[in-house]
Amino acid sequence: MDQQLIKSLIDAMASSDLSELEFSQDGWTLRLARGTALPAPTPAPAHSAVAAVRPTADATTVAEAVVAAPLDAVPRTLAAPLYGVLHLRPSPDEPPFVQLGQPVRAGQTLCVIEAMKVFNEVQATHDAVVQAVLAASGQEVDAGQPLFRFA
């Protein structure tokens, strides 16, 4: 997989509202995802090119990398993974998914974003305590917009 192809895939994703894109060619797989919980990548040396990832890494390897990350690398905010209408409650007559000061566990549903009549659950990426809710229920949110801040 050459660098020009990777760049064109990145550009295609950036100009669309896709949240994920996966492309395979000649035994190589490139997966691009928006709004993931992985820590920020470290800068690559100036001489290296963008590299595709062999399909050997699995979800447990990625999860272990996040758990083993230093405390400073744990995200303090959670951003919307896609554009849509934010819902902080499962339904209008039920309590909110989470409240200020509440501890949450990785994988716990924090809210739902409705896009094109599909309700997409937004889950906690790590164990934390909800410090602030940064958007209101019923509000339209953009992909990448911060929704929650954690202590």
Image (cartoon, rainbow, N blue to C red):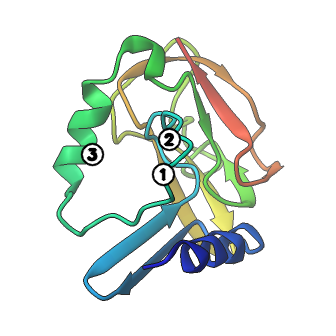
Q: Which of marks 1 and 3 is in front?
A: 1
- Name the amino acid, label 2: Ala
Left or right, 128 with respect to 53, comes to right
Vertical comparison of 111 with 55: above or below:
above
Comparing labels 2 and 3, the label whose residue is closer to the camera: 2
Q: Can residue 12 be seen in this view?
A: yes
Which residue is drawn at the image coordinates 57% and 35% (left, top)?
A: 96
Residue bearing the label numbered 1: 48
Residue 139: x and y in percent read 82, 48
Report the front residue among 146 and 53: 53
Image point (74%, 29%), residue name: 134
Residue 101 location (% of width, % of height): 52, 11
Q: Mark 3 points at which residue?
A: 62
Looking at the picture, which amino acid does disc 3 mark?
Val
In this view, the mark in front (1 or 2): 1
- Badges 1 and 2: C-beta atoms under 8 Å apart? yes
Residue that badge 2 annotates: 44
Give the residue type at disc 1.
Ser
Q: Residues within 10 Å of mark 1 (few under 14, many from 20)?
A: few
